[in-house]
Amino acid sequence: MKYSKKLLILLLVFAACKRNAPDEKLILTDDTMVQMDATYQMDATGGEGKTLSRQALSVATPMHEENVYEEVNKKQLIKDGRMGIKADDLNKTRTMTDSLVGLHAAYYANERYFDTDTESTYHLTIRIPAGKFEHFITGVESGNGRILYKEIDARDVTEQFIDLESRLLSKLNYLTRYRELLQQAKTVKDILDIEDRIRVIEEEIESTEGRLRYLKDQVSYSTLNLMISQEKEFRFIPEKKDKFLERVKQSIAKGWSSIIDVVLLMVRIWPLWLLLIITGLIFRMYVKRKNN
């Protein structure tokens, strides 16, 4: 009877352990597998100094949403857009655009206005904070007028950022090392060589920093090229001309100028006249000798 009770207790304990055992089909992420293998190879120890088994390390750590958002936020994107609007009221649409610019802390980088007989047009280049770019586009689309075209481009420059920052860090390390060598230099030649190298590195650092600042500006502010146009009714406007007497005076003056130009041209080609005179004399002498 006692043997049966012990056997029953052992079976219950075994079943409970089996229910608590980790699932071997659990899918592990790449980071968890690397961490698990490294821990297994190092033969890590548990809380009481006991060696942890590979099975004990096989529980995968789920990827939190915060990590995903951090990776997305690290992406450096440059957004550019082009839009064209055919407005019913040009001034009203322009006023609405000014309101959007003030509301989203944007600014005009360039502004051009063209007025022809058939159309009045604004060409606007607007710099908008990257986080408010989509809201600005939505505001423009919800305004008055018909959308003629719309193009939005996004360029991923994360790799350029990483490359420039890596190069900048490397150049700063070289600069620090060369400055230390400059303190240890003893000959004039060594000092001049090191100073020349420091100058080159400083110029490269300034160039890299300038490129980084430019990329950061392009990422921080998106660019929208916006064209707002309004058709106008065609009206014939006669060209303004001077009075008749003034036009007569102008014609007389132009005619006299033409005569002076012709006289000056005749004087200017005096070598040709001289050549013609000499040729005529020679021909006359030849004819006279032939007759004799």
Image (cartoon, grey):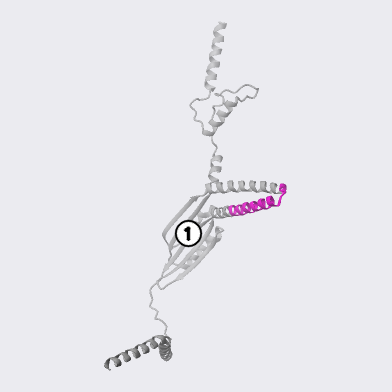
Residue range in magenta is 183-209
Residue 134 visible at all: no
Quadrant hosting residue 2: top right
Indicate the position of residue 211 as horizontal and vertical percent values: 57, 54
Indicate the position of residue 21 as horizontal and vertical percent values: 53, 22
Residue 130 visible at all: yes
| Residue found at x 31% / y 90% | 286
Instruction: Name the secondary structure under disc 1.
Output: helix
Seen as rendered, the residue at the extreme front is 292
Residue that numbered label 1 is attached to: 140
Image side of residue 65 versus residue 179, left or right: left
Looking at the rendered image, the quarter that the C terminus falls into is: bottom left
Seen as rendered, the residue at the extreme bottom is 292
Q: In the rendered structure, does residue 205 fall within the stretch colored magenta?
A: yes
Q: Please count the marks in the image.
A: 1
Within 10 Å of the Cα at label 1, are there few (<14), some (14-19), or many (20+) other Cα atoms?
some
Q: In the rendered structure, does residue 254 fall within the stretch colored magenta?
A: no
Image side of residue 193 versus residue 255, left or right: right
Indicate the position of residue 42 as horizontal and vertical percent values: 60, 26
Indicate the position of residue 230 as horizontal and vertical percent values: 42, 67
Seen as rendered, the residue at the extreme left is 291
Image side of residue 179 versus residue 137, left or right: right
Whether residue 63 is situated above or below residue 237 in the rendered picture: above
For the stretch drawn in magenta, what is the main secondary structure? helix
